[in-house]
Amino acid sequence: MDRICYIFGAGDRSRHTIDLHPYDLVIAADGGFDYLEEIGIRADIVLGDFDSVTSYDLPSDAIRYPREKDDTDMMIAVKLGLEKGYTVFEIYGGLGGRLDHTLANIQLLIFLSKKGAIGTLYCDDYAVQAVNAGSIVLGKDTAFNVAGNLCSVFALDRHCHNVTIQGLKYEVSGADWYNSNPIGVSNEFTGKRAVVSCTKGSLAVLYHYA
């Protein structure tokens, strides 16, 4: 079973239940500490510049960073998880709210893919994954893979080569996609195992829950 690095930010909350195991890692990135306080989960690591946290109960070992820095708090958390050997990241509170933070977190998914890891951003009724020159497998036994549920695929690079989509309602084979054309909006799950891939470039996959 994969060890999972859970990261919590200050964005929109999710209704999903989180089933932690002893070998998982939980990181609160700034206002993500408030998120964890609300759902009753203890963070293994609390970090950030703490410009968005409202709680006065930050732990004494919280890692404080200056507000003026290159990396976002979420990126710092991701890099820490990678340093500790994690390759599967589930990120909550990374969508909604400020659009610039949402876009930054989608870029973060590409960063993870280039490091050989996989990340998923969760919101209340949808999630986002991304891949660089590789594939994303959407299993048939997962909660979101229900016939009729929406699944959109976007080119994030100027030119994505050999885009292939299998197992969704509208399939694609070896196409060239561009980030100036949102051709992949509103595809649909069929209940079958789905695979989205490209050989060069970066793709984002956004899927909705019923």
Image (cartoon, grey):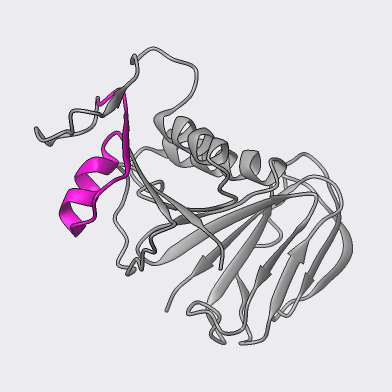
On screen, residue 127 versus residue 204, left or right, reads left
Q: Residue furthest left?
A: 56
Q: Position of residue 117 (x, y in %)?
A: 64, 49
Q: In which quadrant of the rendered image does the C terminus lie?
A: bottom left
Total numbered badges shown on the rendered structure: 0
Instruction: Tell me, yes or no, if residue 156 can be seen here.
Output: no
Above or below — where is 184 with respect to 77?
A: below
Residue 72 sits above or below residue 185 on the image:
above
The residue positioned 56% from the left and 35% from the top of the image is 83
210 w.r.t. 79: above or below: below
Residue sitting nearer the eye, 116 or 83: 83
Q: Is residue 5 magenta?
A: no
Q: What residue occupies the far front of the structure in this picture? A: 22
Residue 28 in the image: state x and y as whole percent. 32, 41
Find residue 97 and report its image quarter. Answer: top left
Q: Was residue 35 drawn as part of the magenta stretch in this picture?
A: yes
Q: Which residues are magenta?
A: 29-50
What quarter of the picture does the N terminus occupy?
A: bottom right
Q: Is residue 107 visible?
A: yes
Percent x, y of residue 26: 36, 49
161 sits to left or right of 191: right
Is 25 on the left-hand or right-hand side of 53?
right
- x, y percent for residue 166: 77, 75
Q: Residue at x 48, y 80 (%)?
A: 143
- On the picture, is 203 further left or further right than 41? right
